[in-house]
C-alpha cells in the first residue's frame, strides 16, 4: 500500500474523478491535524500566483484567514513539498512568524502564531513561496503529477496542495484567486464572476477567479487554449483545449450537456451557477479529475478515435453533485462520492441504452465489483487499500455502485430517487458521512436498513445462489417445477426472484423470501421447462460459476493494462480451465498474444473464442477484427480482409467495431500499443 497520500479520495480515482485522496496522505497528515489542524476552520483564501512556464516555476502569495475552534498558539497547514515557503507573516501583514515546513514526509507547514488565541478568533496569515512544478515530486501521488507548469500548458489541481490549506477534501472556503500568465495564454477555471483578463503588461496578463460560496478551491489549467462553448438547459459548457485537440470538442460538449441535464432532473440543480468548464490536461497526470464547476480531461481521451467513453464522462460530471457539492466528513466516507458518482453514470447509461444493453452494462459492473471484493469492505477500503489500485477501484467504485443499485431494488425506485434528491438538498454545500446517509435512508424508507448497510457496506462476502428442482407433468398436459433455492450466507435476507425458462420463450417468474440459507419454491408453466434461473435481473451482487470465470478474466485484464503479462496470462488461463469454452477468456488470451507479437498463437486464440460460448455477445465481431489484425501482422492480407468482411457482415457495432472494420479494410493493421478492446 502506498502510505503517502491524503484524506478523502477520488482519487483519482477522488475524483477520477474529482479529488485524489489516498491512504498515504491520510496517514501522514492525520496525526498532525489531530494535534493542531483540527483546531482551525479555513474561511477564505486570497491567492496571487504567477506561472513561469519556461522555468517550470510557480511563484505565489496566499493569504489564509481561518477561525480557531479552540484555544491555540499554533496551526498546521498542508503544502506541496516542491514549493518552498520563504516567509509567513502574521495578521498585521508585517510580523514574521516562525514556521517549520516538512517538504519530504508529512508535506505540511507548522506555524507558531506568536501568541495564544482564544476559541473563535479570526486569524489571517500571509505565505510567500515558490518552486518548480515539473514532476510528481512533492505531491501526493508518486508516479503522477497533479500540478505542472510548462511551456506546452499548465495545470494546478486542488489535490496537489499548491497553496497552503487545511482539512483535505473537507474544509471548504471562499476564494479569490488571481493567476498571471504569458500574454498569449488563457487560464481556465470556475468563477462565480465573469472571467476576463487584465490588460497586457510586460508581456503578461492576469485572470481572476472568485468563489463566493465555500468550496474546495484552486483547480485551474492554463495554456494557449482554443475555446468552444455549448449551451444547454441554462448552463454554458466551456471547453478549453490545446491546438490539435479540438476535433471532437463539440461531441464532448453535447454529451456533457446531456449528463448535466439528466442529473439536474434526477438529483437537483447543478450547484455552480451558469457555467461548467472543461480543460485539457496532459498524459502525465490522471485521465480525469474534477473541481467545483470544472472537469479536466486528458489529451489521450480527447483525441482518441474510439467512441466517447460515456461511463467516464458521466461519472466525472456526477462528481459535481457527489463529492464537490455534497462533500465528505472523513476519509472513510469515500463511498458516498465515488460509489454514487459511478452509479450515477450507470443511471445515465440506463437512460440512453436499451434494456438489453443496460443488462449487459450492469453485468459488467457486477464483474468489476467482484474482482477484488474480498480484499476489503467498502467502509474500510479507503484506509486499507491504495486508492490507485485496481482493488480500491473494484471495491469503492464498482461494488459501491452496485450497492446503490441494490438499495434501489430494496426500497423501490420512487423512494430511492426521493432519497437522492433529499440527500442532495439536505447536504449541498455541506459535508456528509455514511451514517448521515444511512439515517436519511431509514427515514425515507420508513424502516430500519441497518441489516442492508451492515451486510453490503460494512462487510465483505456475497451470496452464491444454487437451485435443485424436479419437473412434474400435470394431467392437463402442463408442467409444475418444485425445488429449493439455496445460498451460503447466514446474514443474507431478502426477496429473490426465480425465473422458469420454457420452450417458446414463455418464461414465468416467482419470488421467494429467502430469510435463511434455503427456501422452497414452486412454479407452473404451460411450456416445457428448460432451466431455472435464480435472480435473473441481477438484483443482488452475487457469485456463480459463470460470474466466477468473468471475475478471473477481469483480474487478468487489470494485470494486462499494467503490462504485467505473465500475471495476466495466469489469470486468463485459470478462467479457461474453469470453462474451456469461455470466449471471453480466449479472446483476452488472443489480445495478449497480439500485444506480444505472437501472431500464430493470437490467430488460434481468436478462433477458439469464435467457437466458444460467445459470451458476451460482442465477442464475435471483435474476434473477427482481431483475428484479421493477426493475419495482417503475419503478412497474410487476403485472410485479414476476409476476417474484416466477416465482422462487417455481422452487422454488430459494439464499441466502434464497424469504424474499425472500415479502417482496416482501407489499410493493413499495424500494431497499436494500448488500444486493444478488452471489454
Image (tube, grey):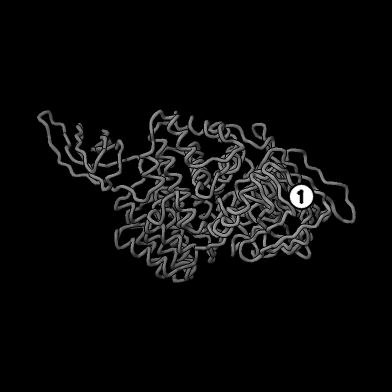
Observer-nearest of 177 and 587: 177
Picture layout, residue 602 above or below residue 12 = below
Residue 521: % across, % down:
20, 36
Picture layout, residue 562 above or below residue 315 = below
667 sits to left or right of 634: right
Q: What element carries label 1?
A: strand
The total of numbered circles placed on residues is 1
Q: Which residue is drawn at 55% across and 60% down?
A: 24
515 sits to left or right of 380: left
- Residue marked by disc 1: 63
Instruction: Specify whether residue 250 is in view.
Output: no
Q: Residue at x 40, y 32 (%)?
A: 411
Residue 16: % across, % down:
56, 51
Badge 1 crowding class, 10 Å Cα cut-off, few under 14, some 14 to 19, many 20 or more, is many
Q: In which quarter of the image is the C terminus?
A: bottom left
Instruction: Specify whether residue 498 is in view.
Output: yes
Observer-nearest of 339 and 433: 433
Residue 462: % across, % down:
33, 48
Q: Residue furthest toward the left? A: 475
Residue 414 occupies which quadrant of the picture?
Answer: top left
Observer-nearest of 182 and 546: 182
Residue 413: % across, % down:
43, 31
Amino acid at each position: 500500500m502506498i502510505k503517502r497520500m491524503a484524506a478523502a479520495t477520488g482519487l483519482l480515482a477522488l475524483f477520477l474523478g474529482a479529488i485524489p485522496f489516498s491512504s498515504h496522505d491520510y496517514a501522514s497528515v492525520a496525526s498532525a491535524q489531530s494535534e493542531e489542524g483540527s483546531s482551525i476552520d479555513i474561511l477564505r483564501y486570497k491567492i496571487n500566483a504567477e506561472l513561469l512556464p519556461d522555468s517550470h516555476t510557480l511563484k505565489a502569495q496566499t493569504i489564509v484567514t481561518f477561525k480557531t475552534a479552540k484555544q491555540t498558539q499554533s496551526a498546521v497547514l498542508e503544502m506541496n513539498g516542491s514549493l518552498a515557503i520563504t516567509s509567513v507573516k502574521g495578521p498585521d501583514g508585517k510580523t514574521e512568524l516562525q514556521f517549520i515546513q516538512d517538504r519530504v514526509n508529512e508535506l505540511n507547514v507548522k506555524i507558531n502564531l506568536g501568541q495564544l488565541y482564544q476559541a473563535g478568533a479570526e486569524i489571517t496569515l500571509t505565505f510567500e513561496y515558490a518552486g518548480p512544478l515539473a514532476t510528481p515530486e512533492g505531491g501526493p501521488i508518486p508516479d503522477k503529477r497533479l500540478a505542472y507548469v510548462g511551456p506546452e500548458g499548465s495545470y494546478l489541481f486542488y489535490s496537489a496542495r499548491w497553496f497552503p490549506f487545511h482539512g483535505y477534501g473537507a474544509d471548504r472556503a471562499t476564494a479569490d484567486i488571481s493567476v498571471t500568465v504569458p500574454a498569449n495564454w488563457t487560464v481556465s477555471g470556475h468563477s462565480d464572476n465573469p472571467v476576463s483578463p487584465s490588460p497586457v503588461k510586460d508581456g503578461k496578463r492576469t485572470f481572476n477567479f472568485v468563489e463566493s460560496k465555500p468550496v474546495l478551491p484552486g483547480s485551474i489549467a492554463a495554456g494557449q487554449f482554443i475555446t468552444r462553448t455549448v449551451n444547454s438547459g441554462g448552463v454554458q459548457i466551456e471547453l478549453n483545449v490545446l491546438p490539435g485537440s479540438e476535433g471532437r470538442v463539440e461531441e464532448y460538449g453535447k454529451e456533457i450537456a446531456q449528463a448535466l441535464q439528466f442529473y439536474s432532473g434526477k438529483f437537483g440543480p447543478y450547484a455552480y451557477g451558469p457555467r461548467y468548464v472543461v480543460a485539457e490536461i496532459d498524459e502525465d497526470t490522471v485521465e480525469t479529475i474534477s473541481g467545483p464547476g470544472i472537469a479536466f480531461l486528458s489529451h489521450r481521451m480527447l483525441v482518441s478515435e474510439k467512441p466517447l467513453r460515456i461511463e467516464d464522462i458521466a461519472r466525472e460530471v456526477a462528481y459535481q453533485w457527489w463529492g464537490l457539492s455534497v462533500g465528505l466528513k472523513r476519509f472513510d466516507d469515500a463511498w458516498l462520492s465515488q460509489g454514487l458518482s459511478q452509479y450515477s453514470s450507470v443511471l445515465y447509461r440506463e437512460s440512453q441504452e436499451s434494456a438489453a444493453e443496460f443488462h449487459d452494462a450492469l453485468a459488467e459492473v457486477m464483474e468489476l465489483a467482484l474482482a477484488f471484493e474480498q480484499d476489503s469492505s467498502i467502509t474500510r477500503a479507503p484506509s486499507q487499500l491504495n486508492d490507485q489500485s485496481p482493488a480500491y477501484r473494484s471495491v469503492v467504485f464498482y461494488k459501491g455502485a452496485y450497492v446503490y443499485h441494490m438499495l434501489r431494488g430494496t426500497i423501490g425506485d420512487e423512494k430511492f430517487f426521493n432519497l437522492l434528491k433529499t440527500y442532495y438538498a439536505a447536504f449541498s454545500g455541506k459535508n456528509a458521512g455514511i451514517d448521515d446517509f444511512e439515517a436519511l435512508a431509514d427515514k425515507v424508507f420508513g424502516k430500519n436498513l441497518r441489516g442492508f448497510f451492515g451486510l453490503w457496506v460494512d462487510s465483505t462476502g456475497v451470496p452464491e445462489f444454487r437451485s435443485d428442482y424436479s419437473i412434474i407433468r400435470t394431467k392437463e398436459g402442463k408442467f409444475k417445477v418444485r425445488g429449493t433455492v439455496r445460498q451460503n450466507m447466514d446474514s443474507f435476507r431478502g426477496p429473490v426472484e426465480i425465473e422458469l425458462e420454457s420452450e417458446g420463450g414463455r418464461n414465468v417468474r416467482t419470488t421467494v423470501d429467502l430469510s435463511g440459507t434455503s427456501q422452497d419454491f414452486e412454479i407452473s408453466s404451460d411450456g416445457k421447462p428448460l432451466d431455472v434461473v435464480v435472480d435473473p435481473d441481477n438484483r443482488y451482487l452475487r457469485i456463480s460459476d459463470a460470474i466466477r470465470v468473468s471475475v478471473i478474466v477481469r483480474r487478468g485484464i487489470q494485470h494486462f493494462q499494467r503490462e504485467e503479462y505473465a500475471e495476466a496470462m495466469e489469470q486468463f488461463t485459470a478462467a479457461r480451465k474453469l470453462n474451456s469454452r469461455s470466449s471471453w477468456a480466449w479472446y483476452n488470451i488472443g489480445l495478449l498474444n497480439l500485444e506480444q507479437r505472437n501472431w500464430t498463437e493470437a490467430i488460434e486464440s481468436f478462433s477458439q473464442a469464435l467457437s466458444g460460448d460467445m459470451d458476451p455477445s460482442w465477442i464475435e465481431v471483435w474476434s473477427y477484427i482481431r483475428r484479421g489484425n493477426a493475419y495482417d501482422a503475419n503478412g497474410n492480407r487476403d485472410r485479414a480482409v476476409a476476417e474484416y468482411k466477416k465482422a462487417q457482415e455481422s452487422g454488430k457495432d459494439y464499441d466502434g467495431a464497424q469504424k474499425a472494420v472500415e479502417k482496416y479494410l482501407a489499410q493493413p493493421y499495424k500494431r497499436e500499443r494500448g488500444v486493444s478492446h478488452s471489454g
